[in-house]
Amino acid sequence: MPEVSVIVPCYNAEKTVTRALDSLASQTFRDLEIIAVNDGSTDGTLQTLKAWKDAHPDINIRIFSKENEGIAETRNFALSKVRGTYFGFLDSDDYTSPEMIQEMKELADRDSLQLVVSDFLWVNSRGERLQKEGPYACGSDMMVNLFAVLWNKLYRTEFIRSLDIRFPKGCRYEDNCFLYCLAPHLSRIGFTEKPYVHYVQVENSITHNNNEQVKNMVEVFEIIIDYYRTHGFFDRYHDALEYITIKAFLGNSFLRSCQVKDRKERKEAVRMGWDLLNREFPDWHRNPYLRSLGGLKNRYFSMVYDWNIDLLTWYFHTFGSSNL
């Protein structure tokens, strides 16, 4: 059995997946398997995967092909195939530095960690930008400071499988759901300050430009909040859970909703998040993190009320959010 499994979900990735796989083939740590899952691609992704496997007979890659069900079900499917002591993710658009798995695994082994977190690099047409994550403590501190992406982290397989956490079928923002539900279970996490993953931002991708997908965040946060309630975490982590809901529906999700072109759909998307926030956390203006963390964004969050949210929606739709 391999020591580390790396999951590579693939959907219409024929132009980028070779670079991702090449970066895994270049890892200094060799006892790994690649789990590449073709999620019903309509281009030549499957053929590209097979050709890459034929060209790299020394690399342990397992290719699976299934009908298109979306990224969440693709991740669930791949997790069921993991054989490594640890596993990680690499999206087919991205690529990683050769020392990533070796160094993160050594840290996990040394300190018996359940999760290892690294920094990463944003990559776009303007160049590269460093994104730091952590260090933070387990529990509330992690929830408040977590960067909710999967692929800059290494997970202990046995620990993850001991939990009843799955990616939400049919939902985007599945990484938020997985990581926020994981957070209250963790007791041993570690950090490396090296930026291994190059996260490639594709300007015309669904993630960045299909703003109607923002509505999907409501369903994801309903799942997260219900998870905390049913597992007895809600009261203990109330303030942190409230704060991440504020950030979701007055921050990125709200700002993306503001860019929906159709006025009726734009208002509906904004109101769905606003209604969820106020229904679940009616006293959210008193959240302690809004004051203790400070900063322009938290001051802005504190200023949003029912009487001015439509005005703010118009403002950010018209002028953007570059000053926030």
Image: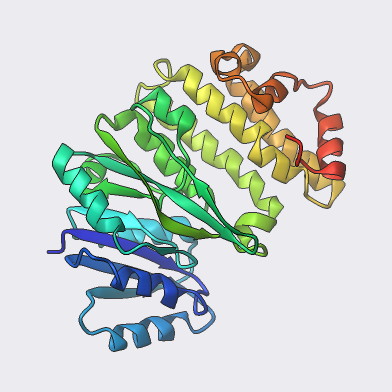
**Above-or-below relation of 277 to 222:** above
Q: Where is residue 10 shown, x and y percent of the image?
A: 45, 69
**Residue ID at (47%, 34%):** 224
**Residue ID at (41%, 32%):** 227
**Residue ID at (47%, 64%):** 94
Q: Where is residue 249 shown, x and y percent of the image?
A: 65, 33
**Residue ID at (34%, 61%):** 77
Looking at the image, residue 36 sits to the left or right of residue 124; the answer is left
Looking at this view, is 105 or 3 the one in front?
Answer: 105
Q: Where is residue 174 shown, x and y percent of the image?
A: 48, 48
Looking at the image, residue 64 sits to the left or right of residue 10; the answer is left
Looking at the image, residue 158 sits to the left or right of residue 270; the answer is left
Q: How many numbered dots are placed on residues in this image?
A: 0
Looking at the image, residue 165 sits to the left or right of residue 274; the answer is left
Q: Where is residue 223 shown, x and y percent of the image?
A: 48, 37
Quarter of the image where the C terminus is located: top right
Quarter of the image where the N terminus is located: bottom left
Q: How is the image coloured?
A: rainbow
Which quadrant of the figure has residue 182?
A: top left
Which quadrant of the figure has residue 300?
A: top right
User: Can residue 158 be seen in the rendering of this structure?
Assistant: no
Which quadrant of the figure has residue 284?
A: top right
User: Can residue 234 be seen in the rendering of this structure?
Assistant: yes
